[in-house]
Structures are given as C-alpha cells and as structure tokens.
C-alpha cells in the first residue's frame, strides 16, 4: 500500500531536517548494487532512531537485523566514542555489505556485525555478559519477533528502550492471518508485551516511502 503524497512528504522531511549524507547515501547505493532488498528504514525513521538513542543517552546498542547497515549507521552515530553497537545479521552476504558500509562511515571501531541466526547469537551474547544494552532495535524476520523481544528483556536493564519495526503490516496486524507467519509472529509479540509487567509500551502507525506500517516502542521498567 503506497501513496504518492506520503512519499512526497517523507522526501520533504528528509530534505529539510533529516537528509542523508555521503556515507548514508553510499550505504544505500552499495546495498542496492549488491542486490539487497530495498527495505532499509526511511531517512526520517533513521533520524528517529538516532534521536531516541541520544535521548536515551545510550552507550550500548543491540540491533537485530542489519541488512546493509543503514539503520546501524544512524544508531552508531548517536554513541559516544567509547560506545558499542552489536548488530546481528542472518545472511553472510548482507553482513559483508554492512561491514563495508559501516567502515566507510568510519564506525567500524564501535560497531560489530555478527553473522548467523539471531536466536543462536543471542544466547552467546548472554553467555559473554554482553548486556545490559541501553537500546535494542529489532528489525528482522517477523515470525521470531516474540523471541527477539524476550531476548531483549534478558539483555536489558530497567530503563532500556526496545524498538520493534514493521508491526502494522499494512493494517493486517489488527486481524488474524493464520496463513501469514509474519502477522502471526507480530501478534504473538504484542500478546507477550501486553502480559509482560516489566514492559511499558505503545505502538503507532506510519505512512511514507515505506508504505503503511508502524513501530512498537517499549521501556523496561524493572
């Protein structure tokens, strides 16, 4: 579901208050050249992630789903010089593109991209004592969203912010679609958040260059 006016407004916002710079533009170009799907966050959404990390005063960030590293760059730029960001990417080819883009942006000293299924990588992070993270951004396969949120809780502290992308699914999240695992997983994630006393959350719908979708925003309270 797309609308030319949504796209025009997003372009206006990006051009006036959240423009891509050379490194971000190069990241998108390199991702497209490598054949990655064009599903990175929009520039104004990348800027939102950047500002959330800054407002949070984040020093450590966990990203689940790297793709070409576009959102990773936005998030990492909000970190202090001694901050760290760990991003988990299933596809080795995507991870290679992301690492090159992150290095081009001058952020390879504070960003680590780990390759493999996130549900394998997350237990290893816990075993390493990698947490707690100040902010977790989840933008990976939607069927596993409830598992990713559960792991985000394990790797969090009181005050950690958790952001989950693509939770509206063209409005289909409001109705059951048992034949669509992305919607089933997203609804299961909402059910988990609703019954989890340690999470205070909201969700909102968005329209723009990425169509009709939305975000979940949650704060760990205990």
Image (cartoon, rainbow, N blue to C red):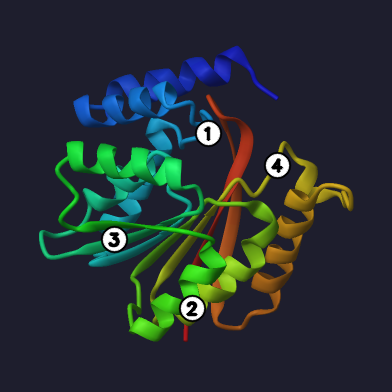
Distance in Å between CA atoms under marks 2 and 1: 27 Å
- Distance between mark 3 and mark 4 Cα atoms: 27 Å
Residue 127, percent across and down?
Answer: 40, 85
Helix, strand or loop under label 1: loop
Q: Which residue is mark 4?
A: 169
Residue 220 at least partly seen: no
Which residue is under mark 1? 39
Of tags 3 and 4, the one toward the viewer is 3
| Mark-to-mark CA distance, 2 and 4 | 28 Å
Please give left or right for residue 25 compared with residue 162 in the image.
Answer: left
Q: Is residue 209 visible?
A: yes
Q: Position of residue 204 (x, y in %)?
A: 59, 48
Residue drawn where x is 33% and y is 78% of the image = 130
Q: Which residue is mark 2?
A: 123
- Secondary structure found at label 4: loop
Sequence-first tag of 3 and 4: 3
Sequence-wise, the earlier of marks 4 and 1 is 1
In the picture of the structure, the residue carrying the numbered disc 3 is 85
Residue 131 versus residue 113 in the image, above or below: below
Measured as percent of width and height from the top left, residue 207 is found at 59, 31
Q: Nearer the viewer, mark 3 or mark 2?
A: 2
Q: Residues within 10 Å of mark 3 (few under 14, many from 20)?
A: many
Circle 4 or circle 1, nearest the eye = 1
Q: CA distance from mark 3 to mark 1?
A: 21 Å
């Amino acid at each position: 579901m797309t609308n030319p006016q949504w796209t025009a407004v997003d372009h206006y916002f990006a051009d006036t208050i959240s423009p891509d710079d050379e490194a971000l533009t190069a990241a998108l170009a390199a991702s497209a050249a490598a054949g990655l799907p064009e599903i990175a966050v929009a520039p104004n959404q990348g800027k939102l992630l950047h500002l959330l990390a800054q407002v949070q005063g984040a020093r450590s960030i966990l990203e689940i789903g790297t793709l070409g590293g576009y959102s990773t760059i936005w998030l990492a730029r909000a970190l202090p010089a001694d901050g760290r960001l760990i991003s988990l990417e299933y596809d080795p080819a995507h991870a290679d593109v992301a690492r090159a883009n992150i290095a081009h942006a001058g952020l390879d000293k504070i960003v680590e991209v780990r390759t493999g299924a996130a549900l394998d990588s997350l237990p290893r992070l816990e075993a390493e004592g990698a947490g707690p993270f100040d902010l977790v951004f989840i933008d990976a396969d939607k069927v596993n969203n409830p598992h990713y949120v559960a792991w985000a809780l394990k790797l969090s502290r009181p005050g950690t912010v958790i952001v989950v992308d693509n939770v509206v699914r063209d409005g289909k999240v409001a109705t059951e679609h048992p034949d669509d695992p992305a919607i089933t997983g997203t609804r299961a994630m909402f059910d988990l958040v609703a019954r989890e006393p340690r999470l205070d959350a909201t969700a909102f719908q968005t329209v723009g260059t990425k169509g009709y979708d939305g975000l979940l925003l949650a704060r760990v309270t205990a």
